[in-house]
Image (cartoon, grey):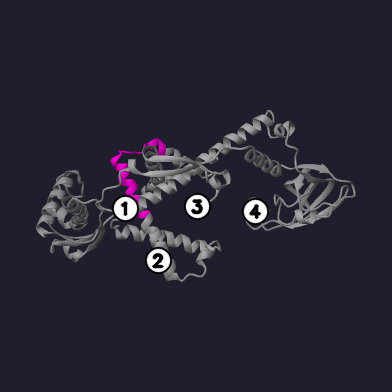
């Protein structure tokens, strides 16, 4: 086997050739390996002549030999060059493969591969990181309490002559019919429905605006085409509705009774739970901002060539996501007036930053011997599966069968562990800031 290497920055091209005679030797060895297990009509088991095997199956066996040789020789070329690949090599065959399989031509191919840059990461003990922190005040707790009260309104009975308005609750009985016949699951008594909650079939709640206690009416609706009950999907229905009460929303008094209505012992326990949640939110925000500061420092401290294909892959992923966001009308307003060339240049810089930081964090993690264990990956997989209720098993099987998907699970776990290692090792200074500044999206001082 001969191998010739050419280099351009971090891109490498390895030209490999394997003489036909070497392939023939491998073919003969493979035939002798499998011949004892062969059982062909007209021959005793294990006694099929090599010449017959070669005549009947030589081409397909040679295909296996060539595939194995490509794998072996490409790995050897990379090992001999003593480089770390930055991704899978791209193979390009140069031989006439039919002639190779017939044993009449040498195997010749070349492969393109980007290699990892050789750099020395900064000594993380010299990094100076600012970490904003905030104290929990009564105002934060009161704000959370108010939000909880607003999201859990109480309802007060209106006068009998009062007409129902948007956001009111109505106490109703209803009976649904298809073609004049009641259908299963289409009736209830004493049901409370908040108008505007969109919990009923589209159009149902709208027809109850303006009703008052004692009213009886027919509500005409059509079930959506994609309705979960297939026997109802797309069909017109009539509901006989009787209104018993109309109730107006009322912001709850924040007291022990309110807390008990949430299933707690009292207001003190509710405040304790809110305090604990705010502490978690503040800790998460502090870490996120310290991480941003850390990543900025790492980006400033390193300047080295990047594997072109790695940058291109990252850019393509960013660009596709950007296009999807723009198509959905969720693009950044600041991007609206920029040309495509300017946008691509801007987002390519982002791709380069991400790749550079990824390589730096990976190298710091390697030197610190940071690893992730199977239990951590398993927990991340289960967490992801829970985002798809009813499909958990399918999601887990997808990850188990897809190495790229598993790698995407491992990557953020590893990054977080490296970041935590740096924050524990670097010179981190806590800086007190107002809570609104801590929770703001910007990092401005």
3D distance between C-alphas at marks 3 and 4: 48 Å
Determine which residue is flagged by label 2. Answer: 345
- Horizontal side, residue 39 vs residue 409: left or right: left
Identify the residue at the far left of this view: 21
Q: Is residue 214 above or below residue 331?
A: above
Looking at marks 3 and 4 on the same chain, the residue that comes earlier in the sequence is marked by 4
Q: Disc 4 and disc 2: Cα gap in Å?
A: 46 Å
Q: Position of residue 230 (x, y in %)?
A: 64, 52
The mark that comes first in sequence, 1 or 4, is: 4
Per the picture, the main secondary structure of the magenta-coloured stretch is helix
Residue receiving disc 3: 444
Q: CA distance from mark 3 to mark 2?
A: 25 Å
Compared to 195, does 140 lie above or below? above
Instruction: Name the side, left or right, on which 137 lies relative to 246.
Output: left
- The image's mark for residue 302 is 1
Looking at the rendered image, the disc whose residue lies closer to the viewer, 3 or 2, is 3
Q: Camera-side residue: 223 or 367?
A: 367
Range drawn in magenta: 354-377
244 to the left or right of 271 = right
Q: Tell me where residue 400 appears, x and y as whole percent.
A: 40, 44
Q: Quadrant of residue 57?
A: bottom left
Q: Earlier in the sequence, mark 4 or mark 2?
A: 4
Graded by Cα atoms within 10 Å as few (under 14), some (14 to 19) or many (20 or more), the crowding at tag 3 reads few
The verdict on residue 295 being magenta is no
> Mark 2 or mark 1, which is nearer to you?
1
N-terminal label among 3 and 2:
2
Q: Secondary structure at mark 1?
A: loop
Q: CA gap, disc 1 to disc 4?
A: 55 Å
| Residue 66: percent from left, percent from top | 19, 56
First-in-chain label (1 vs 3): 1
Q: Marks 1 and 3: which is nearer the front?
A: 3
**Residue that lies at the very extreme toward the top in this rendered image:** 265
């Amino acid at each position: 086997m001969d191998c010739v290497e050419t280099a351009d920055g971090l891109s490498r091209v390895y030209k490999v050739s394997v003489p036909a005679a070497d392939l023939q030797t491998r073919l003969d060895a493979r035939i002798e390996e499998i011949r004892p297990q062969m059982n062909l009509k007209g021959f005793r088991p294990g006694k099929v002549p090599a010449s017959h095997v070669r005549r009947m199956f030589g081409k397909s066996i040679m295909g296996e030999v060539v595939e194995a040789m490509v794998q072996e020789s490409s790995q050897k070329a990379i090992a001999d060059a003593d480089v770390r690949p930055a991704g899978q090599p791209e193979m390009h065959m140069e031989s006439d493969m039919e002639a190779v399989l017939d044993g009449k031509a040498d195997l010749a191919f070349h492969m393109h591969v980007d290699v990892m840059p050789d750099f020395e990461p900064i000594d993380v003990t010299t990094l100076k990181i600012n970490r904003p922190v905030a104290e929990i005040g009564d105002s934060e707790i009161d704000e959370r309490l108010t939000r909880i009260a607003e999201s859990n309104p109480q309802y007060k009975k209106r006068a009998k002559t009062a007409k129902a308005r948007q956001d009111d609750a109505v106490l109703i009985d209803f009976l649904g019919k298809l073609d004049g016949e009641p259908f299963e699951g289409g009736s209830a008594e004493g049901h409370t429905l908040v108008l505007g909650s969109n919990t009923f079939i589209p159009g149902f709640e709208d027809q109850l605006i303006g009703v008052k206690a004692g009213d009886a009416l027919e509500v005409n609706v059509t079930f959506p085409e994609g309705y979960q009950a297939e026997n109802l999907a797309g069909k017109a229905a009539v509901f006989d509705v009787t209104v018993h009460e109309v109730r107006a929303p009322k912001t709850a008094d924040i007291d022990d009774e309110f807390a008990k209505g949430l299933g707690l012992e009292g207001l003190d326990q509710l405040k304790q739970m809110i305090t604990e949640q705010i502490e978690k939110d503040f800790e998460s925000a502090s870490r996120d901002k310290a991480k941003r500061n850390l990543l900025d420092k790492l980006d400033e401290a390193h300047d080295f060539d990047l594997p072109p294909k790695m940058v291109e892959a990252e850019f393509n992923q960013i660009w596709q996501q950007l296009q999807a966001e723009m198509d959905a009308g969720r693009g950044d307003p600041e991007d609206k007036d920029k040309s495509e060339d300017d946008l691509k240049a801007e987002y390519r810089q982002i791709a380069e930053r991400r790749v550079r930081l990824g390589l730096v964090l990976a190298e710091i993690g390697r030197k610190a011997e940071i690893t992730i264990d199977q239990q951590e990956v398993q927990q991340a997989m289960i967490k992801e599966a829970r985002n798809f209720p009813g499909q958990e098993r399918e999601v887990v099987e997808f990850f188990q069968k897809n190495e790229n998907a598993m790698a995407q699970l491992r990557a953020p776990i590893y990054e977080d562990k490296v970041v935590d290692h740096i924050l524990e090792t670097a010179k981190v200074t806590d800086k007190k800031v107002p809570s609104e500044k801590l929770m703001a999206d910007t990092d401005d001082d």
